[in-house]
C-alpha cells in the first residue's frame, strides 16, 4: 500500500488497526496507572473515529465495521461474539449496568438499537432502524420498531 493511501485512510478514520490494538492492550495491562493511560488513549481514539467503545466491553476478534466506528456506541458491559458486522449509528446500550450479549456471526444494520440485559443468538440479522429489547433466538431476522422476528432458520455451522 502506498503512503498516500495510508494517509488518506487514516485521515478519513477508516483505519481502525490502532484502535483494536489499543483495545487489546487495554484488556491485558495489569497496572492501574498504565491501564488508565491506555484507557484514555482508547477513548480518545474512539472519539476521533466518531464512536464510543466501552473499556470493559468483551469483544471476540475484531468486528467488521464497514463504515468505521462512525456513530457506533458499544457499552462497557456489552459482550460481542466473533465475526459480527456492525453498520453506522448502532447503539449497543445498557440499562442498569446490564448490556446485551451478542452471539457469533451477527449482522446489525444501520441505526439499530440493541439495549438491556438480553441475549442475541448466533447468526442473527438485525435490520436497519430496529429497536431490540427482548431475547432473540439463533438464526433469526429481526426488523421494525418494536422488533418483530421474521424468520427462524438454523444458523450456518
Image (cartoon, rainbow, N blue to C red):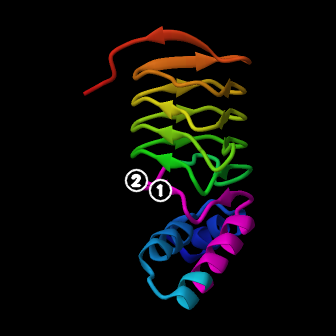
Answer with left or right where residue 43 lies relative to residue 24: right
* Residue 75, x across and y down, in percent: 63, 52
Check residue 52 for magenta coloring: yes
Answer with left or right where residue 29 lies relative to residue 147: left
Q: Quadrant of residue 6?
A: bottom right
Q: Residue at x 49, y 41 (%)?
A: 101
Q: Disc 2 vs disc 1: Cβ atoms closer than 8 Å?
A: yes
In this view, the residue in front, 59 or 64, is 59
According to the image, label 1 marks what residue?
58
According to the image, label 2 marks what residue?
60
* Residue 110, x across and y down, in percent: 68, 34
How many marks do you count on the picture?
A: 2
SS type, badge 1 = strand
The numbered mark at residue 43 is none
Q: Residue at x 63, y 65 (%)?
A: 9
Q: Residue furthest left?
A: 157
Answer with left or right where residue 117 lies relative to residue 1: right
The residue mark sitting in front, 2 or 1, is: 1
Q: Is residue 10 above or below residue 30?
A: above
Quadrant of image for the C terminus: top left
Q: Is residue 108 above or below residue 91?
A: above
Q: CA distance from mark 2 to mark 1?
A: 7 Å
Judge the density around disc 2: few (<14), some (14-19), many (≥20) Cα neighbours within 10 Å.
Answer: some
Q: Residue at x 42, y 44 (%)?
A: 81
The magenta region covers 37-63
Q: Residue at x 64, y 28 (%)?
A: 133
Check residue 42 for magenta coloring: yes
* Residue 26, x across and y down, in percent: 50, 75
* Residue 63, x across and y down, in percent: 48, 50
Amino acid at each position: 500500500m502506498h503512503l498516500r493511501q495510508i494517509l488518506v485512510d487514516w485521515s478519513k478514520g477508516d483505519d481502525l488497526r490502532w484502535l483494536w490494538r489499543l483495545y487489546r492492550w487495554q484488556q491485558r495491562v495489569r497496572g492501574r496507572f498504565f491501564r488508565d493511560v491506555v484507557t484514555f488513549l482508547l477513548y480518545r481514539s474512539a472519539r476521533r473515529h466518531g464512536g464510543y467503545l466501552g473499556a470493559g466491553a468483551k469483544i471476540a476478534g475484531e468486528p467488521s465495521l464497514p463504515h468505521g466506528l462512525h456513530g457506533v456506541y458499544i457499552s462497557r458491559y456489552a459482550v460481542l461474539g466473533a465475526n459480527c458486522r456492525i453498520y453506522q449509528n448502532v447503539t449497543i446500550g445498557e440499562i442498569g449496568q446490564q448490556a446485551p450479549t451478542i452471539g457469533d456471526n451477527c449482522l446489525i444494520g444501520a441505526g439499530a438499537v440493541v439495549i438491556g440485559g438480553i441475549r442475541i443468538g448466533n447468526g442473527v440479522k438485525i435490520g436497519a432502524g430496529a429497536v431490540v429489547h427482548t431475547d432473540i433466538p439463533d438464526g433469526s431476522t429481526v426488523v421494525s420498531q418494536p422488533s418483530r422476528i421474521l424468520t427462524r432458520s438454523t444458523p450456518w455451522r
